[in-house]
Image (cartoon, helix red, strand yellow):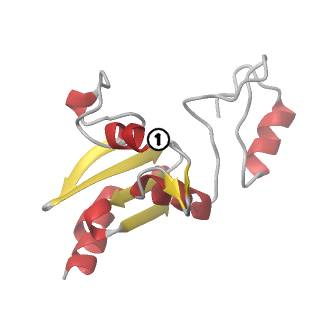
Amino acid sequence: MQSDHIDSATVDAYQRASVAWPVDPQGYHYGASDLRLPARDLAKFGYLYLNGGRWDDKQLIPAAYVAAATSSKGSSPNLDNGYGWHWWLDTDGEHPSFFALGRGGQFIYVVPDLDLVTVITSDPEKGGNPGNLIAQTIVPAVTN
């Protein structure tokens, strides 16, 4: 959490909370960082994007936006580096995929043609690459 301008009580409350998203001094949530969610809620984001922005009978995010955000059709300035709109683009074997990688070891990985959403939360200080676990273990287990 960006704590340089936040009082210590707020930082402590954030660190104890299972769900938190700090606000700036004007009351706006940080748009690019510090959203803290449990693995189950991270999986819901993956499921929502796996289903083209649709949840049950409702289109919550426009399908065209989801398609652009999770493919090379988007216009992100970082597209050459494999970054769409808040999702990294990847391929596991023959399977196009996309993932969100958050600070603190949060990882949402979606492989649409396998109908697969995987969430990993880990301590990045202790090493390991969640992407390797997905590519080398989970995807092969689903496809073999």
Question: Which residue appears farthest toward the right when viewing the image?
Answer: 9
Residue 57, position as x, y percentages in the image:
56, 61
Q: Residue furthest front?
A: 57
In the image, residue 134 sits, relative to residue 73, either above or below, namely below
Res 123 visible: no
- The extreme bottom residue here reads 144
The correct choice, above or below, for 22 with respect to 39 in the image is: above
Residue at (46, 56) in percent of width and height: 46
Q: Is residue 144 left or right of residue 21?
A: left
Determine the secondary structure under disc 1.
Answer: loop
> Dividing the image into 4 quarters, which one contains the N terminus?
top right
| Residue 97 coordinates in the image, percent (x, y) | 27, 54
The residue depicted at 56 percent of the width and 47 percent of the height is 60
Residue type at mark 1 is Pro
In the rendered image, the vertical position of residue 139 relative to residue 47, given as above or below? below
**Which of the image's four quarters has the C terminus?**
bottom left
- The structure residue drawn at horizontal position 82% and vertical position 43%, both measured from the top left corner, is 13
The front one of 120 and 44 is 44
34 or 4, nearer to the observer: 34
**Residue indicated by mark 1:** 62
State whether residue 30 appears in this view. Answer: yes
